Amino acid sequence: MAGPTRDLAELELAELESALAPLDIEPYRAKQIYRWVHRHAVTDWGQMTDLSQRHREALANTFTISTPRVTARSRSSDGTTKFLLELADGRRIEAVYIPDSPAHTLCVSTQVGCAMQCTFCLTAKMGLERHLTAGEIVGHVRVLRSELQLLEQPINIVLMGMGEPLHNYKATMQALRMITCTHGAAVSPRRITLSTVGILPALSHLANESIMPNLAISLHGTTEEQRTLLLPINRRYPLSALLAACRTFPVKRRNRITFEYVLIRNVNDSPADARRLAGLLAGFRAKVNVIPLNAAPGIPYERPTAEQIDRFGRLLAEHHVIVSVRKSRGQDIRAACGQLVLESDRASPGQQLASFINPTVTANQVTEP
Ligand code: SAH
């Protein structure tokens, strides 16, 4: 006899309701099941104690619930923990847990690898292996919440792991609907940040979505030429058009678009860059997150010195930009932005610092406009 074939992990609540009809299970049971799976991370039918034996059997005969499997974890001395997870087809992704207060943050992947080819990013070197499904995106959040005993706690989610979320738009948006569903993990969209290079057609779809995460834009350059050098996608979706799209993006009241700016020595870290950046963002409800480059073997750039980083931040602040500099965390594991690449896939594992990153705002670098 053929085993169960349909993957419940991929279903939104309404889809699950419809899928129960042929089994003669009442639609409201979908909420119970959804709560077990997505809120309590229970995937064993036997533990779903408010369902009858008949229901559990029918469900077990119909559905699998695929769940990414944690195969390795490395914990930094500051608690930042990188997880390696294996998917049903054996491919692997990484995700990062960043302890913080009041809420902890999970840094989540949307693709296996990435197609964007940013020249300073280690994940880019993998190329794109494939998109994640919505169930895999939701699934690795679920597994981490469970492993870290965070099921009952508020968490922040940043789509800043492997991959470009807007290049995998449909699955990413489905995942956000599932993660925010009140019968599931019920994560508030205000606690979710989507980081993107700015794939403009997808960005304009996002502007019309009912579930609106916070938006972070990987800017990294202040001229077309400089940005194209760092993000080849800038040829297709240039800085000028990206900024125009950001101007009309519906930012919620009292909220701001975050512009991420990877600071690279002698590439984009001059006082003129800081002034140009401030000029580009004048009139925006924006904040800038300066990310000092996480250097790595194979990446042809260097991290600026602490003084240079500080000077850049101060200059932005002097020009009335709200700025935070990501502070180093997780010095002893490779968990930082752009460093999510599978060890075994790397030609030279090397020994570089992994500095994660906490959007901490230092008082002397912040000024309200
Ligand atoms: N594809 C999304 C998410 C990528 S990771 C995006 O590009 O926005 C999140 C951030 O880390 C991005 O701003 C990315 O540019 C940055 N990043 C990538 N490699 C980095 C590196 N080596 N050092 C510092 N930041 C890096």
Image: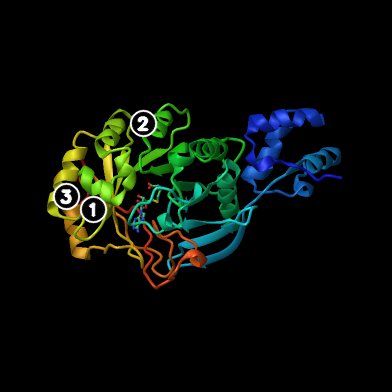
How many C-alpha atoms fall within 10 Å of the one at disc 3: few (<14), some, or many (≥20)?
some
Circle 2: residue type: Lys
Q: Residue at x 16, y 40 (%)?
A: 279
Can see residue 87? yes
Question: Residue 171: which quarter of the image?
Answer: top right
- 347 above or below 152? below
Mark 1 lies on residue: 363
Whichever of labels 1 and 3 marks the residue nearer the N terminus, that label is 3
Residues packed near mark 1 inside 10 Å, few (<14), some (14 to 19) or many (20 plus): few
In front of the other: label 1 or label 2?
A: 2
Q: Residue at x 17, y 49 (%)?
A: 274
Helix, strand or loop under label 1? helix
Residue 289 image point, x, y percent: 29, 49
* Distance of label 1 from label 2 (alpha carbons): 25 Å
> Residue beneath label 2, please?
252
Residue 135, how many percent across, how many down?
60, 43
- Which amino acid type is marked by label 3? Asp
Quadrant placement of the C terminus: top left
Query: In front here: 172 or 59?
Result: 172
Which amino acid type is shown beneath numbered disc 1? Ala
Tell me: 209 left or right of 295: right
* Dot 1 or dot 2, earlier in sequence: 2
On-image quarter of the N terminus: top right
Which of the two discs, 1 and 3, sits closer to the camera? 3
Q: Quadrant of residue 32 in the image?
A: top right
Residue that label 3 marks: 273
Report if the beta carbon of the residue with label 2 is closer than 8 angstroms to ligand 1: no
Q: Position of residue 207 (x, y in %)?
A: 40, 29
